[in-house]
Amino acid sequence: MMDQPDFTDLFNTYFASTSRPICYEVRRDANRGHDLVFLSSLVHDARFPRDAVSLDGQTLTIPMDRDRWEDFREKNALWSVAATLTIGGVVSHEWRLTGDGPPSADDAEFCLRDLYIGEREFRADDDATPTFPLILTGCFEWELAIELDKRTWSIRLADAE
């Protein structure tokens, strides 16, 4: 079997050399799937209160405290930074508790586990389906299902510091 690239090496090498604060935007071309994997790693274990999530027009904003996993290997320490995940082109969104999760109260703190494109694959050439799902999942079995407009979507993470 041929040697395969090590994701952890790629992730840490790239982000260790990236200027601070991090500002990462998912590209709209064929790289979007790869970009989402990196973005999911950047926001893994991020915490945010549900009532801080806001929708203004078609832009969903999630202010969060994210752990700086990109620095863990080099510094052998983990600390958090304030950041904002901004998702544009939102057509709809729905919170789902899928198990014995945290309280459904608006002020409950949620912990983000993964972020990925949902069950309908994104195909730019499929005019019959003008939207695609972006799913955020969390610890304690919750999901935030976001339906995005294929023509106007954007996903961006920006550190505050």
Image: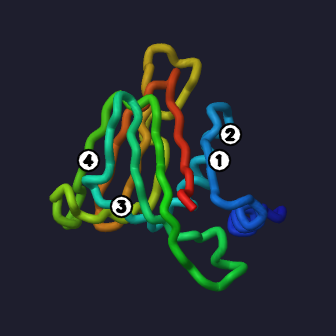
Estimate the x, y position of residue 102 in percent, counting from the top left.
Answer: 21, 66
Marking on residue 31: 2
Give the distance between the C-alpha atoms of the residues marked 4 and 2, in whole angstroms. 27 Å
Q: Position of residue 73 (x, y in %)?
A: 68, 79
Which amino acid does the dot numbered 1 rest on?
Answer: His
Q: In 3D space, how far apart are the residues under numbered discs 4 and 3 (Cα atoms)?
A: 14 Å
First in sequence, mark 1 or 3: give its number.
1
Q: Which residue is mark 4?
A: 95
Q: Could you tell me if the residues under marks 4 and 1 are in contact, i.e. CB atoms within 8 Å?
A: no
Mark 2 in CB contact with mark 1 (< 8 angstroms): yes
Q: Residues within 10 Å of mark 2 (few under 14, many from 20)?
A: few
- Alpha carbon distance from label 1 to label 3: 25 Å
**The residue under label 3 is which amino acid type?**
Phe
> How many other residues sit within 10 Å of disc 3, few (<14), some (14-19) or many (≥20)?
many
Q: CA distance from mark 2 to mark 1?
A: 5 Å
For marks 4 and 1, the one nearer the N-term is 1
Mark in front: 4 vs 1:
4
Which mark is first along the chain, 2 or 3? 2
Q: CA distance from mark 4 to mark 1?
A: 25 Å
Residue under circle 1?
34
Residue nearest the viewer, comparing 118 with 17 = 17
Give the residue pinned by disc 3.
Answer: 48
State the colouring used for the structure image: rainbow
Q: Is residue 152 left or right of residue 13?
A: left
Pick whichever of labels 4 and 2 is earlier in the sequence. Answer: 2
* Quadrant of the rendered image containing residue 94: top left
